[in-house]
Image: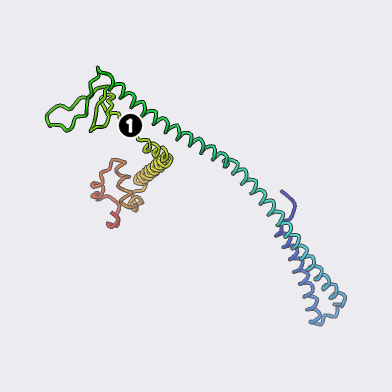
Amino acid sequence: MSGQQTPEEIERTAAEDVLRADQTLADLEQRVLDDDQTVSPQEIETARSARHFAALRQRAAQKKAAALREQQEAAEREKAFAEARKILAEVTDDDVAAAERAAGEAMTRLRETVRARNHARDRAWKVLQDCQAVAPRDRQVGHIRGEPRPVYPELGYGWDNGRPLLWVGGRSLPRMDEDALMDRARTAPAEADSRAQKAADEAARARRIEEDAALYRSDPRAFEELPAARRKPALESLGVDWSRYLGDPNRPRVDPNRI
């Protein structure tokens, strides 16, 4: 521990010296007023001089304390600045710019991949259409109850109201919606945050139910003070029927308005 006095200690010591000098002078003056012949003018003058000197020393102490406070504040500021700089260096604007570039490149790759996928679909459809050995299979319009559902080819082509159809695995393989996929990718972080928050809320709810169930087992009377919206899920987690619980004559007495 440092032996240096704090600004408050420096000021307090100087103030105490002034108070002692004041008291000494006041005592001597009172003795003179009380007709104490042993008090000399020199003692009074010495006490006044000491009081004046103590006041000067107090002003010096106040200046010293102020300078020390400034030093301490400067050190605290520099410490805070250094810590702030260290924190800011963890993730810089360059890092953000690099992440933005990476995101832009990823979005570009997504767009190019969607377009390539759609182009591949269209080319496959054209190959099947150009092949005389592959008969087109259009989508059936309507369905009569009682008749079997239509079976579409594992791989084939056809038409749907004038639009080209490509059958893959017995299902229509439509062209991908570029804008919809791009929008879904853009909103993915927000969707992830929403899922995480929902999971956190569910976990908090589960913890509260567990705590309330433990309270029911350890202190039924305190459990009765909980609102019904909390008691019911806690009891259900323990396999206790809510209606039977409400009708149990051995329950602790509660305000019926809380049920």
Mark 1: few/some/many CA within 10 Å (<14, 14-19, 20+): some
Question: Can you give x and y, in whole percent of width and height, for residue 192 in the image?
Answer: 41, 39
Q: Residue at x 36, y 28 (%)?
A: 119
The residue that mark 1 highlights is 175
In the image shown, does 192 or 148 lie closer to the viewer? Answer: 148
Label 1 amino acid?
Answer: Arg
In the image shown, does 96 or 229 lie closer to the viewer? Answer: 96
Tell me the element at label 1: loop
Question: Can you give x and y, in whole percent of width and height, for residue 240 in the image?
Answer: 27, 43
Q: Residue at x 24, y 29 (%)?
A: 159
In the image shown, does 211 or 73 lie closer to the viewer? Answer: 73
Question: Can you give x and y, in whole percent of width and height, for residue 179 in the image?
Answer: 38, 38
**Quarter of the figure that contains the C terminus:** bottom left
Compared to residue 65, the image places residue 236 above or below, namely above
Indicate left or right for 25 with 234 as reference: right
Q: How many marks?
A: 1
Indicate left or right for 148 with 241 as reference: left
Compared to residue 236, the image places residue 36 above or below, namely below
Question: Can you give x and y, in whole percent of width and height, for residue 105 in the image?
Answer: 48, 34
Q: Residue at x 79, y 74 (%)?
A: 25
Residue at the outermost left position: 146
- State which quadrant residue 197 falls in: top left
- State which quadrant residue 193 falls in: top left
What's the coloring here? rainbow
